[in-house]
Amino acid sequence: MPYIRLEEHLPGITGLLEYRKDSAAPIRALTQLLLRGPSTLSEGERELMATVVSHGNNCQFCCNAHTAIAGVLLDDPGIAEKVWQFPFYFLSRIRDRVGGDLALEKDTEMGTGAVATDNNLLIE
């Protein structure tokens, strides 16, 4: 199995980003655009979406980071825990905020024809 020696003090993806700064720059720019750029969603809502994705991916570092930021931006430190309990409810509320453009798996199964756009869907 390939192995890359990373800085121990840089957890999660931050170690890889530090290791290859040349390839990290576009990834960091994209992340900032998605989380901080113009959007129909607030920065806090986008951080919550990143929290849900990180939680689903079992990435503890990213989950903790996005949870903390979402709590600050939304002035509710416990909001992420509420979202984890009902992630599809949360995502359906976000879908409603962006005018129905966010497709959920259950929507496509029911054949609603909802369409996800790059401006309304955050992928981590």
Image (spheres, rainbow, N blue to C red):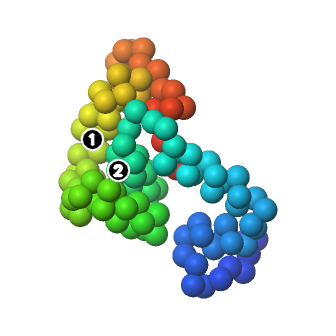
The three-letter amino acid code for the residue at tag 2 is: Gly
Quadrant of residue 54 within the rendered picture: bottom left
- The residue depicted at 39 percent of the width and 67 percent of the height is 64
Secondary structure under badge 1? helix
Q: Which mark is residue 44?
A: 2
Q: Pick the quarter of the image with the N terminus.
A: bottom right
Give the numbered dot on residue 28: none
Residue at the image point whose x is 41% and y is 28% from the top: 102
Q: Nearer the viewer, residue 16 or 29?
A: 29
Which mark, residue 90? 1
Asked where in the image residue 16 lies, by quadrant, the reply is: bottom right
Image position of 55 with respect to 86: above or below: below
Residue 80: tell me if it is visible.
no
Closer to the chain start, of discs 1 and 2, is: 2
Residue 73 in the figure: left or right of residue 34:
left
Q: Is residue 87 visible?
A: yes
Task: Give the residue at x 51% y 43%.
Answer: 37
